Image (cartoon, coloured by chain):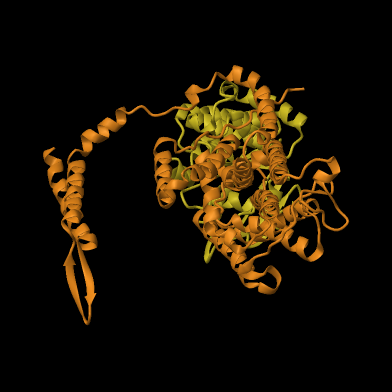
Amino acid sequence: MQRALFPALFAAGVTFLLTCLVIGVKLVQGGPTLTVVGADADTWSWIAFAVVIVFLVQLLKEPLLGLKQRLPMPDVTGLLPDEQLRNRLKPWLIALIVVGLFVWPFMVSRGAVDLATLTLIYVMLGLGLNIVVGFAGLLDLGYVAFYAVGAYTYALLSEYYGLSFWVCLPIAGLLAATFGCILGFPVLRLRGDYLAIVTLGFGEIIRILLNNWTNVTGGPNGIGGIDKPTLFGLEFNRRASEGAQTFHAFFGIQYDSSYKVIFLYLVAVLLVLLTIYIINRIQRMPIGRAWEALREDEIACRSLGLNPTVIKLSAFTLGASFAGFAGCFFAARQGFISPESFTFIESAIILAIVVLGGMGSQLGVILAAIAMTILPELAREFQEYRMLMFGGVMVLMMLWRPQGLLPMKRPHLELKAS
Amino acid sequence: MLKLDNVSTFYGKIQALHNVSLEVNQGEILTLIGANGAGKTTLMMTICGDPRAQSGHIAFDGRPIQQLSTADIMRQGLAVVPEGRRIFAGMTVEENLFMGSFFRSRSEASVQLDHVLTLFPRLRERFHQRGGTMSGGEQQMLAIGRALMSQPRLLLLDEPSLGLAPIIIQQIFEIIERLRDEGVTVFLVEQNAHQALRIADRGYVLENGRIVMSGSGDALLNDDSVRKAYLGG
């Protein structure tokens, strides 16, 4: 306590000085002269309160820290049943969840389905970035660029050549993968911070390019009226466009705008399931192992004859292609895209999803994507405090579970000796 | 089997190897001894293609390899145990070993796995343990085992005794001898000159990037200048 007294006084003094300067006094321009005006009594009492708080906290820091040590830390893994039971239940659980995903939209409101579709897009993006950041350990801050490539691929092809969503989906994935490859070649010799900066730059380049290439992309006005996906050629509009048929007319039911929303949701579910399946397979393949080994020790990998460039490039390309799929779907769902949708904050959110979920953990990433899209919607009343809460949650997460919500568990393979 | 002919290597402007020529013959243990900074590790890494030899020729089984990329060189039938072990700390022993047989078929890998596990029974005990949680000696065994998983004909070992207890060093050297008896050619780079020369068939002494002496292991062990410089008189 004695030892803490001086630092506490010092901290309180600094707080007082700073708050005085920042909110205690104001410069007011009255005509030609500047006058200094003191704050009102209310503000002063708040300042005094703050100073006292800082003083007390600094003084009692050690007992408080001791108290924190004794706080029980939440342990999620302890709540799960033991491994054997889990393994037996797993297929059933997965089946239940998949069936639930398909049945659920028919029972809830349109808004909820729409939100779920958005969530699924982020799940897809999170899973894609997870390959790059979580598996291969390459920090990519420009992931949104590939998302944008996918979205604009569909938007432009649909506008200029009238190609349908289903044709454009693989093209978008391929094109995004190509961009991933092109970016990957020069930058993959970089590591860590430098790689992050270059990818960040790439993300901005794509956005600025889309913003300024006005005669093709429409610039900041974006591209509107993008066609929605069709079900084997059946449209979900009220009236069919020329030479096409509508869904409700084909099945002889009343037109309802929620069909479209539910259909989009189902497409998203399918895409996400496909993504999960593919990534799961790849993770078990040698290339998945190689990503992980590369993350752990590049020199060791080279000593074993693995080519780091090829391995990194494959992670980058594959991750980018999933962003391309997500982007294509995003454009179709939105019906309107502009460079506004592909700012840096999107990259940051996707990265936050991966980190929050636990790097490399698929289930963790899915949970984090759900949390990151639904929580802000639920907290809509606190609009202006949203980012503050977001930051607070991040700090708490890093304190309690720095390894993420559900840390990665590597799939276990046993080779049988023949 | 491996032949270096007038190899010179530079780090930027600094020349680390000066016209080094040496030869590793089939089925022998060849050791390279030298003080700190003599260029031992550089020589080993030059063989692996990183850094590249600026001049001279490196041939493995008569084929030049100095133009190949590191990844290609490492698939030619030689394997390296890098200095400082460099195992994958977060992966299990099993996964570490299978990374070594990345370019082999499954059946080849499982045969070789059995072989490695008989050489290092310790690794069988620790099969599902994470590499990073093992002791230094076990990690060195794992590093050697991992290199052996690719069924190399030539094994390059860079200071396998680094930071290990004498009894473990003894074990490691016994295993190296056993490997030679099984037909694996071993190129051993060591600071622990005494141990290395004892098991070596032939040896080279590297000083300031130049080969200054060569001869059979026994001859070097009994050579006065070698004794004075590396064996403590």
Q: Position of residue A18 (x, y in %)?
A: 21, 59
Residue A390 vs residue A404, the one in the foreground: A390
Locate residue A64 relative to residue B141 in the image: left or right: left
**Does B191 sit above or below residue A25?**
above
Residue B206 versus residue B170: which sits nearer the camera?
B170
Q: Outermost residue toward the bottom?
A: A32
Left or right, A277 with reference to B32: right
Report the front residue among B56 and A158.
A158
Q: What residue do we see at 50% from left, 52% from top? A: B38
In the rendered image, residue B97, in percent from the top left (x then y), is placed at: 63, 32
Q: Residue furthest right?
A: A243
Q: Is residue A14 visible?
A: no
Q: Quadrant of residue B80?
A: top right
- Give x and y (percent) for residue B121: 59, 21
Q: Where B49 falls versus B27 (above or below)?
A: below
Would residue A5 be visible to someone looking at this image?
Answer: yes
Look at the image and give the colour of chain B: yellow
Q: Is residue A3 above or below residue B7?
A: above
Which residue corresponds to the image point at 62% horizontal and 72% vertical from the top-left? A212
Q: Position of residue B175 (x, y in %)?
A: 60, 29
Chain A as rendered: colour: orange
Q: Residue furthest front?
A: A254
Which residue is rendered at x = 75% and y = 56% of the image? Answer: A227
Which image quadrant: the N terminus of chain A?
Answer: top left
Q: What's the residue at 58%, 30% (across, down)?
A: B92
The quarter of the picture where the C terminus of chain A appears is top right
| B168 on left or right of A305 | left
Disc tally is 0
